[in-house]
Image (cartoon, rainbow, N blue to C red):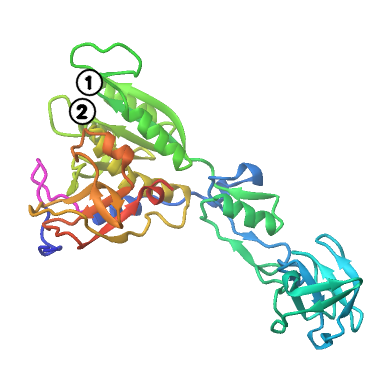
Amino acid sequence: MTTADPTATRPASATGKRLLGVEEARATILSAVAPPDPSAAAPIALEQAAGRVLATDVVAALSMPRWPNSAMDGYALRLGDVGEGGLPVSQRVAAGTAPAPLAAGTAARIFTGAPVPEGADTIVMQEHCRVDGDRVFVEKTPEPGVNIRPAAEDFTDGEPVLAAGTHLRPQHIALAASAGAASVHVQPRMQIALMITGDELVPAGQALGDGQIHESNGHMLAALGAQLGAEIQAIHTVADDADATRETLARAAANADLIVTSGGASVGDCDHVRSAAESIGELAFFGIAIKPGKPLAFGRIEDAPLLVLPGNPVSLFVTFLLFGAPLLRRLQGRTATMPEALWVPAGFEQTRTRGRADYIRVRLEDGRAVPCGGQGSGILTPTAIADGLACIPPDSTVAPGEPLAYWPMATLLD
């Protein structure tokens, strides 16, 4: 891959101002907002906590395991007692029972997860034993201490097991329960107001007139917000009208934690979002050096952050994943805001350089990133079948086999 100086000035926007690079734009957005106030957190039952964000650490109320326990179905014994004459079986220990100390010169029948009797130092798996009457014969002598899980192997009483800022997934819920937590303190769900602009938009299912299309961006943004644990407070569909745009933004700012807009973000005669936002709020920047999604802006209206996204559906999808999702994670108090890129070999060639970072929808084929379908900003089908996004840096060419930064959809949508 041949790459120009990455510190070179990025292309200019239509206003003549330098376009921010992707990392610079994301850093600007994240530095402008703060994690939520811990005092806003509230307890929630563990069975309702999946998808929420921890506001405080979960501290273990006990050690796990509570006692040494068996990793196998077999026989608990003192390894020094094993001999050719076998050992009498003195007790049977199942999970959920309390064993007696192991009598000298005997073995205990034991099952997976059961407490190891005091005095036993080894568990011999049943496949390596032979039973004859009330005696057990060890046919394959193991190493000392084998198949015993030590007490507190997982965690210790008083130890933090989950940190504040954790996005609770099923495995976190299980760990919290194992640590004795019936409830956890979580951050409130972020309230997002969506504003979708465009005279040409008609709700899905309704008949289309000349020049009209079905509105899809509102559905996409609502699903993206829900996927990331937010609540959609309202979806406003607004015509290409300056007064209506300004009034809708002001109304959204009164109640939302975050405002996200779609369309009307360029510099055409029918694009009013930028001027409306600047008339009642402020924009930190307008335009970034990215393809797709150049006409992206970020600012604030009163106390609500404002993310202005392009109207083309692919541009909206890509820019939300790269900028909207990290912003939402920060507002939720999550520890990580942007997943780390993986590096995969390119399964294609690009000989033309571009002055913007190019995020392409790809599938992995034999471990290589291969573009899936047309990459136009209005072609949604490849977005639905892509495994992830790969980035071609600005002013770069790509040869087959050269490494590309790659983000699986699963991590971008988490």
Q: Is residue 399 magenta?
A: no
Examine the image and state in which quarter residue 217 appears: top left
Task: State the residue position of label 2.
Answer: 272
Label 2 Cα crowd, 10 Å radius (few <14 / some 14-19 / many 20+): many
The answer to whether residue 108 is left or right of residue 349 is: right
Sequence-first tag of 1 and 2? 1
Q: Residue at image x 76%, y 70%?
A: 126
Task: State the residue position of label 1.
Answer: 241
* On screen, residue 103 above or below 157: below
Specify the label residue 254 is tagged with.
Answer: none
* On screen, residue 156 above or below 319: below
* Mark 1 secondary-structure assignment: loop
Q: Residue at image x 47%, y 52%?
A: 333
Tell me where the magenta segment starts and ends, as one range. 11-21
Whole-percent x, y for residue 77 in the image? 82, 79
The answer to whether residue 231 is left or right of residue 304 is: right
Amino acid type, residue under disc 1 in the picture:
Asp
Instruction: Say which of 29 and 122 sits in front.
Output: 122
Q: Residue at image x 21%, y 33%?
A: 378
* Mark 2 secondary-structure assignment: loop
Whole-percent x, y for residue 354 in the image? 10, 51
